[in-house]
Amino acid sequence: MLILHIFMLAAGLIILPVGFYANYEAKSPGISSADFALIGLCLAILGTLLICVPNFFKGNPCHSQSSCHIRYLLMAMLNQDSFDLHDSMI
């Protein structure tokens, strides 16, 4: 999947200046020439996001064991339940 994300970033960085050039050189700027720049920008941003944060769209809130413990403790404090701190971490 990393190859696909790198391809998205590269395609976005190629399409973005092509869209700006097409919009600048067109006699009457139309929707198609302006769309190339927008599509290139979206591809570049999405490719960069997916390279840096690969599981961004997976929706897994617990990426490590310590974050699951912190989440459990916060939920327990919000519910105002009585719980033993040492038993909850084991």
Image: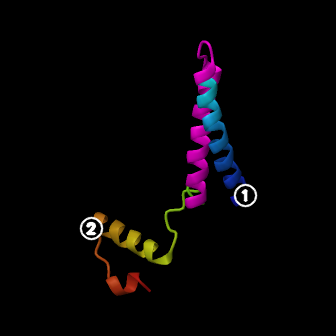
Question: x%, y% of residue 28?
Answer: 60, 12
Relative side of 44 to 90, left or right: right
Question: x%, y% of residue 36?
Answer: 63, 30
Secondary structure under tag 1 reads: helix
Mark 1–mark 2 distance (CA, rounded to whole Å):
47 Å
Question: x%, y% of residue 41?
Answer: 57, 39
Amino acid bearing label 2: Gln
**Which contiguous range is marked in magenta?**
24-53
Amino acid bearing label 1: Ile
The residue to which callout 2 is attached is 80
Mark 1 or 2: in front is 1
Q: Quick check: 20 above or below 88?
A: above
Q: Quadrant of residue 3?
A: bottom right
Secondary structure under tag 2 reads: loop
The residue to which callout 1 is attached is 3
Q: Quadrant of residue 16?
A: top right
Locate the C terminus and report the quarter of the image it occupies. Answer: bottom left
- Classify 10 Å Cα crowding around label 1: few (below 14), some (14-19), many (20 and above): few
Label 1–label 2 contact, CB within 8 A: no
Foreground of the two, 37 or 25: 25
- Classify 10 Å Cα crowding around label 2: few (below 14), some (14-19), many (20 and above): few
* Residue 57, visible in the rendered structure: no
